Image (tube, coloured by chain):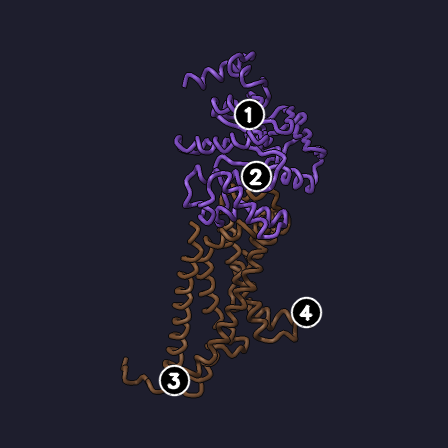
Chain colours: A purple, B brown
Amino acid sequence: MISTKNLYKSFGKLEVLKGINLEVKKGEVVVIIGPSGSGKSTFLRCLNYLESPDAGIISLNNMQVDTQEVKQKEILALRRGTAMVFQGYNLFKNKTALENVIEALLIVKKMPKDKAIQLGESLLDMVGLKDKRDQYPSTLSGGQQQRVAIARAMAVNPHVILFDEPTSALDPELVGEVLGVIRKLAEENMTMIIVTHEMSFARDVADRVIFMDEGIIVEEGLPSEIFSNPKEERTKRFLRQIINR
Amino acid sequence: MNFYNIDYAYMVEVFPRILRTAPLTLGLAFSAMILGLIIATCLALTRVFKIRVLSTLTRVYISFFRGTPLLVQLFMLYYGVPQIIPSLAKMNAMTAAILGLSLHSAAYMAEIIRGAISSVEKGQMEACLSVGMTPMQAMRRVILPQATRVAVPSLANSFISLIKESSLAFTLGVAEMMAQARMSSAATYKFFENFLVALLIYWGISITIGFLQDRIEIKLNKAY
C-alpha cells in the first residue's frame, strides 16, 4: 500500500534517516517508537513531503516516486493520497471546526458545498464533536482540537493517515479521548502509521511495532514480541528506560 | 496673535467648497491603496517564497521607493518618464498620481505584509499541504486571511499616510483638497482660513479611518 525503499535524509551534516525500508499493508496499523532524535517524525514527514528525502523510493498504491527525480505533480499526488495529524494540531485558526474539516473537500476535491457539509458533520459526529461545529479552534480544548484534526484528516479519504505524536502536546487527562478516536479508526481498518510515546496504547492498537534509533529501523515485530521479548539490545534499553520512568 | 482676525464667516463659506473636493482626495488615496496592496502582496510573496532574482529585485524596489522623496518620484513619473517613453505622455495627472502613490506605498506595505505572513505559524502551511492544497491555495485560504489580522493596524496607518500624501497630487495639477485650498486662498489671501479648513477635513477623514479600523479589527479577531 505505502512503502519506502532506502529512504535517506540529512539536515546539513546530520544524517537523520539512513536507509529506511518499510512496507505497510492496507488496513494495517503500524506504530513507530524510539528515542527522540531517532528520525521517527522526519520519516513520517518525508512520506508526505513536508520534508524532501535525499534519496530512496516512496510508493503509494500504484505510484512510485523516486525521490531523486521527483516532480511537483508526484508530491501533490502523495499529499492527496495521505493525511497527517500533527503534534500541535495545526487546525486552521481562521476557520470553525466544520470549516476545518471541509476545507480540503471544497478546495482540493471541489465537492459541492452542501455535500461537503453533510460529510463534515458526520465526521465531526464520529469524533464526538458535532455540537462544536461552529466553534473556532481557540475555543476548543487540546483534545477537542486534535479530534477535529483527525476528522479533517479523514475527510480527504486518504489511503493512509500519518500520526506524528498526536498526544504529546496534550494534558494527561485529555490523552484518552484522542486515543479513543484513533482506536475507533483502527477498528474500522483505517491504514495508519503512528509515531507515539504511549506504549500501552501502542501495544493495544498496533498490528506491528517498529523500533527506530539513530536513523535506522532496529527491530520490528508484533507488539507482544517487541514489548515482552525484544531481541535487540537497543530496544531492550529503550523499553527499560520508558518503563522505569 | 489676534483671534479676531479670523474670518469665521469666510470659513463657513469656503468649507463646502473644499469639502466638495474631498471625494477626489479619497478616491485618489483609495485607488492607490488598492493598487498598492496588490503590488505589495506580489512583492511580499516573492520574498516569502524566496523566489530567486525576483526577491532580490523586490529588495531593490523597496530600498529605492523608501529611500527617495515621494515628491520627486511623482515629478519623475509625470514629467520625466514620458520624455523617455513617449507612449506615457498621454497619461493624465490623476492616473500619474494614483500610480505614483501606489508604487510608493507598496514599498512600505510589502514589508508589513511580509512580516504579517511570517507571523503565521509554520504549522498552518504544513497542515494545508498535508491535505493536498497547493502553496497558493494555502496562501489564499489560510495564510493570508490570518496575516490580514496582523497587518490591519499597520495597513490602516499606511492608508492614513496615503490620504495625507495625496495632497502632493496638487503639484501635478490634480484638483484635490489641497489644490482647492490653495486656489481659494490665492484668490482671497485668506491662507489661514483655507488651510485650517483643509486640515480639519484631513483630520476628520483620518479619525474616521481610525474608527473603521477598530471595527475591522473586532471583526477579524472574532476567531481568536
Instruction: Residue under label 1, please give it.
Output: A31
Are marks 3 and 4 in one subunit?
yes
Asked if the residue under mark 1 is in contact with the one under mark 3, i.e. CB atoms within 8 Å, the reply is no
Asked if the residue under mark 4 is in contact with the one under mark 3, i.e. CB atoms within 8 Å, the reply is no
Question: Real-space Cα distance between discs 3 and 4?
Answer: 41 Å
Instruction: Residue under label 2, please give it.
Output: A154
**Amino acid tagged 2:** Met
**Amino acid tagged 4:** Ile
**Amino acid tagged 3:** Lys
Asked if the residue under mark 2 is in contact with the one under mark 1, i.e. CB atoms within 8 Å, the reply is no
**SS at mark 4 in the image:** loop
Give residue A143's quadrant in the image: top left
**SS at mark 3 in the image:** loop
Question: Real-space Cα distance between discs 1 and 2?
Answer: 18 Å
Give residue B3's quadrant in the image: bottom left
Point out which mark residue B190 bears. Answer: 3
